[in-house]
Amino acid sequence: MSLASLDAEKKRVLMFGGKGGVGKSTSSSATALHYALSGERTLLISSDFTPSLSDIFETPVGATETSISGVPNLWAIEIGLDEVMRRWKEKFGPQIYQVASAVVDMPYDDLIDYVGMAPGIQEEFMLDFILEYVRSGRYEMVVWDTAPAGDTLRLLNLPSRFLRHLRTAPRFYFKAQDMLGVSKLPFLDLINQWSDLSEEIMRFFTDPAQVEFVVVTIPEALGVYQSRRVIQELAQHGLKVRRIVVNGVIETSDSEFLNCRKNMQHPYIQMLQNEFGPAALTKMPLLSGEVKGLKMLREVEAVLFRPC
Ligand SMILES: Nc1ncnc2c1ncn2[C@@H]1O[C@H](COP(=O)(O)OP(=O)(O)OP(=O)(O)O)[C@@H](O)[C@H]1O
Ligand SMILES: [Mg+2]
């Protein structure tokens, strides 16, 4: 089945994840193009440390929303953790400093950087950052080209760690309150606020009515085994993967070499079909050219969203 089945579901965020180099950016760019061409205001976000959207769309894309020339309704942004943390500092810095400076004497930047190193904070605010685009109402569809598999899992794993950390934090602060002999530490309000935010983020990203996580893979051992692990781990976080793009499939072969690779791919495609059901798979053939520029992206889009 193709990704066209997603059209009727009206999701707010489509995430693409998978092992390095399997075609996440290609698939997410073609998907964003699909929704923009259907008239939906679409934002394509890349959170990869080495983003490639500028190369794929052959137009500069930076850390602010950039309109993609030649495609109405399409904007893109390449965002790194540094930028996320800069915005986090802007949003929460003064409040953190206000409460923390009551008990510690540290320069503003040192203190905020120190708090920013707490486990899960960076990932938490990457998710918050993306959620803010959804909340802003400026976009009908947000397509997120996530960083390679390990990082994606970290991203989804750590907010729950952060949440656990926040749940135990009040005990610690009550103790500190006793020891310092003060009647009320303002930390608690901030912690409660973050705890609410964290819960809201987890609720949103695990809501199948709003978010879909599409795994991209290639029909080879490393791709299939890693996808299986990613899918299992996402399930543990309440995120059920229902769609897998199998990229680089060799459908026709006119040489001994391609025939060998086609035969190599066959059992892995079977394996994915048996495990996740044929309806979950969208097969994307290996194209003869690199996927770069709008013409090639439209070719990919046409296959990924072939009418069901
Ligand atoms: N179906 C395809 N046919 C031919 N080339 C493809 C296909 N899909 C992707 N490619 C090419 O493979 C390369 C890797 O694809 P892409 O950048 O989308 O992968 P990625 O998963 O985003 O990689 P990374 O993990 O480095 O971000 C690119 O040069 C792209 O043009
Ligand atoms: Mg990429």
Image: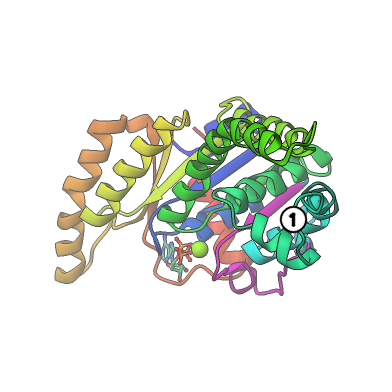
Which of the pair 291/222 is nearer the observer?
222
Q: Position of residue 107 (x, y in %)?
A: 78, 67
Q: Does the magenta stretch include residue 46?
A: yes
What is the quadrant of residue 162 in the picture? top right
**Which SS class for mark 1?**
loop
Q: Residues within 10 Å of mark 1 (few under 14, many from 20)?
A: few
Which of the pair 194/111 is nearer the observer?
111
- Total marks shown come to 1
Which of the pair 80/118 is nearer the observer?
118
What is the quadrant of residue 23 in the picture? bottom left
Which of the pair 257/67 is nearer the observer?
67
Disc 1: which residue = 104
Q: Position of residue 284 (x, y in %)?
A: 40, 52
What colour scheme does the image use? rainbow
Reply above or below: 191 against 75. above
Reply above or below: 145 against 113. above
Q: Ligand 1 is located in which of the four quadrants?
A: bottom left
| Residue 3 visible in this rendered orientation of the protein | yes
Q: In this view, does 193 lie to the left or right of 306?
A: right
| Residue 39 visible in this rendered orientation of the protein | no
Q: Which residue is drawn at 71% across and 74% down?
A: 60
Q: Does the magenta stretch include residue 44?
A: yes
Q: Which residue is drawn at 27% across and 35% down?
A: 273
Q: Is residue 160 left or right of residue 200?
A: left
Q: In this view, does 261 lie to the left or right of 226?
A: left
Q: Which quarter of the image is occupied by the N terminus?
A: top left
Q: Position of residue 2 (x, y in %)?
A: 46, 38
Q: Position of residue 224 (x, y in %)?
A: 27, 48
- Residue type of the residue flagged with mark 1: Val
> In this picture, which residue range is highlighted in magenta?
42-64
Reply above or below: 196 against 138. above
